[in-house]
Amino acid sequence: MRTDLTFTIVKPTAFEKNYLGPIIEIFNRNGFKIKAMKLTRMNREKAKEFYAEHETKPFFESLLSYMTSGPVVVAVLQKENAIADFREMIGATDPAKAQFGTLRKMFADSKEANAVHGSDSNESAQREMSIFFTEEELFFD
Ligand code: CMP
């Protein structure tokens, strides 16, 4: 299993507020290379599949309606130790708990509208990227 890839979503509020440019700039500055990227809008079915592990959580319905509320940008990023380094760069799920300098501290509005998603393991990254990209769209060296 590769350890140099992660999957991210720039979430609806961050996209709506035109934070995409600054966020990508920070990805690149931290050494993440863009390997695939697209602007899309999730439907309920796709959001349910993507967040299947949260199906029993009290925030699940709200999360589905939020994530389908507007366009998002999905991307596969490459860097050594991608999963851990990316999660450190984005900060805690709850922006109130995120450290200064992290993306969520800078760009998130709430636990739900927390600006960016980052995969939590190499296995999750593989699963998540295959939900949004075909094999032809994922050309890795
Ligand atoms: P993400 O990294 O995309 O993975 C699961 C998402 O669920 C998380 O970011 C948050 O947006 C959302 N989430 C997690 N915990 C809560 C919560 N307590 N209330 C609302 N949303 C949450």
Image: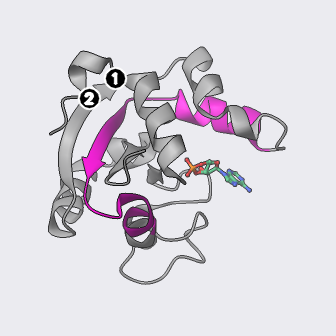
Alpha-carbon distance for marks 1 and 2?
9 Å
Residue 74 is inside the magenta segment: yes
Stretch in magenta: 59-87
Does residue 18 appear in this view?
no
Relative image position of residue 73 (x, y in whole percent): 32, 36
Q: Do the residues labelled 1 and 2 touch (CB within 8 Å)?
A: yes
Q: Is mark 2 on a helix, strand or loop?
A: strand
Q: Is residue 31 left or right of residue 51?
A: left
Residue lying at the far front of the rendered structure: 1
> First in sequence: mark 1 or mark 2?
2
Does residue 80 appear in this view?
yes
Q: In this view, does 81 lie above or below 52?
A: below
**Residue under circle 2?**
38
Residue at x 40%, y 32% (from the top left corner): 129
Residue at x 39%, y 44% (from the top left corner): 7
Relative image position of residue 103 (x, y in whole percent): 38, 67
Q: What residue type is labelled 2?
A: Lys
Relative image position of residue 104 (x, y in whole percent): 45, 66
Q: In this view, does 40 lie to the left or right of 21?
A: right
Number of dots carrying numbers? 2
Within-10-Å neighbours for mark 1: few <14, some 14–19, many 20+:
some
Q: Is mark 1 on a helix, strand or loop?
A: loop
Relative image position of residue 22 (x, y in whole percent): 21, 59
Give the number of the mark in front: 1 or 2.
1
Q: Is residue 133 above or below residue 37?
A: above
Residue 120 is inside the magenta segment: no
Within-10-Å neighbours for mark 2: few <14, some 14–19, many 20+:
few
Q: Nearer the viewer, residue 2 or 52?
A: 2
Residue 79 got which mark?
none
**Residue under circle 1?**
133
Residue at x 38%, y 63% (from the top left corner): 86
Q: Which of 103 and 4 is in front in this view?
A: 4
